[in-house]
Image (tube, helix red, strand yellow):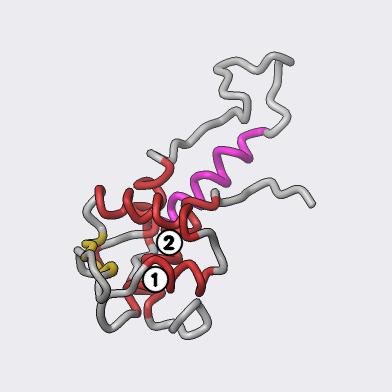
Amino acid sequence: MSKVVTLSEGASLAIHAMIIIGRSSGTINAQLMAQQMQSSRNHLAKVMQRLVKEGFVKSTRGPSGGFVLNKPANEISLLDIYESIEGPLELSECPLGKKICPIGSCLMEGIIHQATFLIKDYFMQRKLSDFIGHSNILSE
């Protein structure tokens, strides 16, 4: 089935991993997170490297190592997490990235811009802390 609006696997893993880490009482390792998310440990490891590089989490090596938040959860928006993986979420008019429509008038009539604006606004308004208390999202 086709989807018009989707989140990349990397962005989805990043957001879910940050929620899991925020809920953890201590460090949590990538293997356990990958199991909870039913995802590839290797793909998650790449995402986690990016989150460490961007300063959202700290990593500790060793048998009791893992990840912890590096910033307060109420200071991290979903947009921050998304953009750390995907780059800036830009508002665009044309799904083809054209300044002038090749057929004269836009078939989408600005719907792409509106949808992107709504998603960006939602991600900007939602903080990681908004999701840490929800028990229906992945938890240990």
Depth check, front residue: 88 or 32: 32
**Which secondary structure lies at badge 1?**
helix
Q: Which of the 4 image quadrants contains residue 62?
A: bottom left
Depth check, front residue: 58 or 95: 58
Is residue 112 one of those drawn in magenta?
yes
Residue found 39% across the figure and 71% down from its top: 19
Q: Which of the 4 image quadrants contains residue 101?
A: top right
**Which secondary structure lies at badge 2?**
helix
Q: Does residue 2 appear to the left or right of 32 in the view shown? A: right
User: For the residue carrying disc 1, how many other residues have a C-alpha within 10 Å: few (<14), some (14-19), or many (20+)?
Assistant: many
Res. 15 mark: 2
Residue found 39% across the figure and 64% down from its top: 126
Residue found 70% across the figure and 21% down from its top: 105
Amino acid type at image mark 2: Ile
Residue found 20% across the figure and 64% down from its top: 71
Do tag 1 and tag 2 residues touch (Cβ < 8 Å)? yes
| Coordinates of residue 120 in the picture (x, y in percent) | 45, 49
Is residue 96 one of those drawn in magenta?
no
Q: Does residue 48 appear to the left or right of 10 in the view shown? A: left
| Coordinates of residue 88 in the picture (x, y in percent) | 38, 39
Q: Quadrant of the C terminus?
A: bottom left
Q: CA distance from mark 1 to mark 2?
A: 6 Å
Q: Is residue 116 above or below residue 121?
A: above
Depth check, front residue: 126 or 140: 140
Magenta stretch, main secondary structure class: helix
Q: Which residue is mark 1?
A: 19
What stretch of residues is rendered in magenta?
109-123
